[in-house]
Amino acid sequence: LVIVHDAIGVNMIDTYVRKGLYPVDLPSGLGGEAAGIITAVGGDVAALEPGMRVAYVTPPPFDAYSEARVVDARWVVPLPAELDSATAAAVLLKGLTSWFLLHRSYRVAVGDWLLIYAAAGGVGSLLVQWAVQLGARVIGVVGSESKREIAAAHGCHHVLLASDDVVGRVRALTDGAGVAAVYDSVGRDTFMASLDCLAPHGVMVSYGNASGPVEPVAPLELMRRGSLFLTRPSLYDFINDRGLLETGARELFAMVLAGTLRVDINQRFALKDAADAHRALESRQTTGATVLEP
Ligand code: NDP
């Protein structure tokens, strides 16, 4: 399919690709999600036609930071008429990530205590809102005072600063029990503290590297803290099946259209200023989602 882009989603992953943390074949573009209009269809592509408004998330090769590109139809989903392209580009990758984290990496149950890092960020904002709707009690962690209110507005029951004694505060808030799962996107700086926040049999979902990749860890560390589970998931392993992608997207779009999942596009940059978008994301200046406008 040829898709002419209306809006392009910016994700922390794009910075990992740019820096070489996630190696790709060079030369390469950047960017793994966008929304726009199909202008040409090649080969045997059912259900997608020129003129349709669509969005996509792709694994490598990355090339979404562009005015138009060719995309394999397997990653493309049609957009409901009521969903504008900027919102779709802001929410597809981050929302599908929230969906698999809450339903697959750990299945959240009513009353669970959860610890969620970067709770005012792109994925974090959606993850918190969705977790609260599933009946979880959420402790959010943010990097600055100004992000506290944002995380609280998303529904966090408690918001901690990254500079707080996170382990001590989490133990106190959970009457010593610890949390059922930690969603840790910060990586290197927070990994061991996250393990210390878990209740016995708790699930450590290490899903990002905002502060750098996590160092190797001995399985005995999981035993010592109460037979913990550790998972290090990637979105692409949860959407490479067409049925799963469609289920996740349907559920996500329904929540966005019903207003139960609020999508805040707090930064917009022209496509030519993509470097500024990366600088803002990497220096922890952004909240919610960031999009590029071609
Ligand atoms: P965010 O909008 O959440 O931005 C990253 C945030 O991480 C910052 O705002 C900051 O929040 C926090 N952070 C903590 N330490 C650092 C640091 N040293 N440098 C930079 N940021 C730091 O980004 P995204 O929503 O795009 O992504 C969130 C996370 O989710 C990323 O780690 C990403 O890799 C991961 N992800 C993983 C996927 C997967 O399939 N496994 C899929 C999609 C995203 P604060 O200041 O509040 O601490």
Image (tube, rainbow, N blue to C red):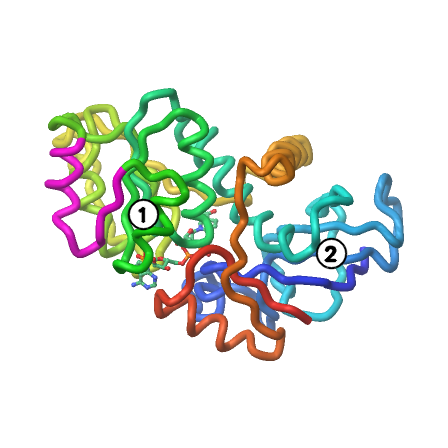
Disc 2 C-beta below 8 A from ligand 1: no
Is residue 98 visible to us here?
yes
* Residue 96 colored in magenta in the image: no
The residue identified by callout 1 is: 117
Task: Relative to 83, say whether 288 is above or below.
Answer: below
Q: Which residues are magenta?
A: 158-173
247 up-or-down from 154: above or below: above
Mark number, residue 71: 2
| SS state under label 2 | loop
Q: Residue furthest top?
A: 110
Give how far across and how far down residue 71 sits, in percent: 73, 56
Q: How many marks?
A: 2
Residue depicted at x 12% and y 48%: 165
Residue at the image position 13 percent from the left and 26 percent from the top: 175
At 29% across and 53% down in the image, what residue appears? Answer: 142
Q: Is residue 163 magenta?
A: yes
Question: Residue 177 in the image: x percent, y percent?
Answer: 16, 26
Q: Can you tell me whether the CB of the residue at mark 1 lies under 8 Å from the nearest atom of ligand 1?
A: yes
Q: Looking at the figure, which quarter contains the N terminus?
A: bottom right
For residue 279, above or below residue 263: below
Picture residue at 54% right of the left edge, 49% below the top: 263
The residue carrying pointer 2 sits among few (fewer than 14), some (14 to 19) or many (20 or more) residues within 10 Å by Cα, namely many
Verify CB contact (< 8 Å) between mark 1 and mark 2: no
Question: Mark 1: which amino acid?
Answer: Tyr
Q: Quadrant of ligand 1?
A: bottom left
- Confirm whether residue 241 shows in the render: no
Q: Nearer the viewer, residue 38 or 294?
A: 294
Label number found at residue 159:
none
Q: Is residue 138 left or right of residue 178?
A: right
